[in-house]
Amino acid sequence: MAANRCDKLSNLCKEAFSAACRAALPSKCVQKSLNRQGNRLLYNGKSYDLRNNVYLVAFGKAAASMVEGAEKVLGEDLVEGIASVPIGTKASGSLKSRFYEGARNNLPDEAAEANSKRIVEFLEKARKDERNIVMVLVSGGGSALLPLPVDGITLEEKLETIKVLASRGYDIKQLNLVRQRLSKLKGGKLAELTAPCKVLGVIMSDIVGDPISLIASGPTVPQEASKLPEIDFSILPRSVSRILQASSPSPTSQSSNANNSIVCNNKIALDAASEFFASHGYTVEIATSTLEGDASDRANVMRDIVSGLLGKKKHVVLFGGETTVRFPAHGKTGKGGRNQEMALAALKNLSESQDTLPESFAFMSAGTDGQDGPTDAAGAVFTSQDLLPAKENLQKIIEQLKAKDSYNFWTQFEEGRCHFKPSQTGTNVMDIQMIVVE
């Protein structure tokens, strides 16, 4: 009976995740933000004339769906469009925009760099008439899909820089400040390149707190001169260190031609998950949509909350945000991502706990894009019935956490039953954690 209840909870988590992703469906969010009235388009408090004069640029994990929503609104007023999308993206064949794939495993590569150069050529054509409108659809993963390094460094050096900093626990905000310094398009430079045309920045947030200037490294958002995080420049390629240590760049123009607005974020997904559980008779708490910090450290919080729910019936606690993974400075590491690591650390903590725990509960940690790190899994979901086999594998859990090899643990544990692989969802509004007590 307990096993059946646990299977039910696991499936409920997966269904709630699907409901969250549907609510954050990019096409729907884009259409809702664009208010067309005849030959006028209202966006973020401003009005624009439509006369077959709109050019569409998109990049990010949600690009295909965002393009679909925009094209439905623009109709014949769209001249043409271009999108840089992840490898494996499925886009409707009826769309006018052209799609180019790149950034395998969510890492910038030569294909994505070639796509960036295509986008620059596309913008040069659009800006020939100042009456044209360039609509830029921005979503998470856009940094990897729009890589065009400044002169003096290579793409490989830029990628090495980001990998080194990420392995030392730098969060996405800090990484994107670095990316802005090293890019020809990020940090408002794409909008500058598009002048004198008007730019509509239609943005889906994948960063805690929705800092609009840092989402996908802010290609359409005017930048103030920003201070870099503290960096040990000796660990970076020499050419990169030289550029980063140069005097602070001038801010991009504040009399911007761009009108930027966030049209979807993590809170929308959390609200949908909350409504799903409420419709099934659960009491729901949304603890936060701004969860940050080290994934394994945050697993301690999850253990304490599960323990505190003893005696509760049909209760759910939801979290949203984006944590990080700290890698050892030296030595070989395994395969995984922040959600798989948090779930594994939570499994370890709960299996070791001396507290009396609820009889039937589930825990899920998953990325709304369906891709946790450079893997094909979104995360993992386990239940109270998995604690006993976890105790039997405790030493293995400890070793694989140390090796940052959470993916391979979940692949093997209980024949992969807890590994959550919904495939790419077409959206990207960070991560969701769920604690569900029956």
Image (spheres, helix red, strand yellow):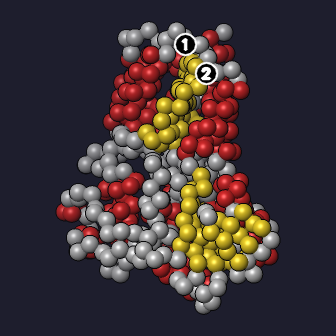
Q: Residue at x 55, y 45 (%)?
A: 266
Question: Which label belongs to residue 270?
Answer: none
Callout 2 amino acid: Thr
Q: Secondary structure at mark 2?
A: strand
**Quarter of the rendering occupied by the C terminus:** top right
Residue 350 located left or right of residue 69: left
Question: Which label belongs to residue 283?
Answer: 2
**Quarter of the rendering occupied by the N terminus:** top right
Residue 275 located left or right of residue 372: right
Residue 277, quarter of picture:
top right
Residue 226 rendering spot, x and y as whole percentages: 31, 65
Residue 318 rendering spot, x and y as whole percentages: 53, 31
Callout 1 amino acid: Lys
Residue 20 rendering spot, x and y as whole percentages: 64, 40
Residue 19 rendering spot, x and y as whole percentages: 68, 38
Residue 174, quarter of picture:
bottom left
Query: CB under 8 Å between callouts 1 and 2?
Result: yes
Res 280 seen here: yes
| Disc 1 target residue | 312
- Asked if residue 330 is positioned above or below residue 434 in the image, the reply reads below
Q: Secondary structure at mark 1?
A: loop
Q: Residue at x 64, y 21 (%)?
A: 282
Residue 187, quarter of picture:
bottom left
How far is mark 1 from mark 2, CA to CA?
A: 10 Å
- Asked if residue 52 is positioned above or below residue 41 in the image, the reply reads below
Q: Nearer the viewer, residue 431 or 90?
A: 431
Disc with the residue nearer the chain's start (1 vs 2): 2
- Asked if residue 147 is positioned above or below residue 415 in the image, the reply reads below
Q: Residue at x 43, y 60 (%)?
A: 214
Res 348 seen here: no
Q: Nearer the viewer, residue 69 or 231?
A: 69
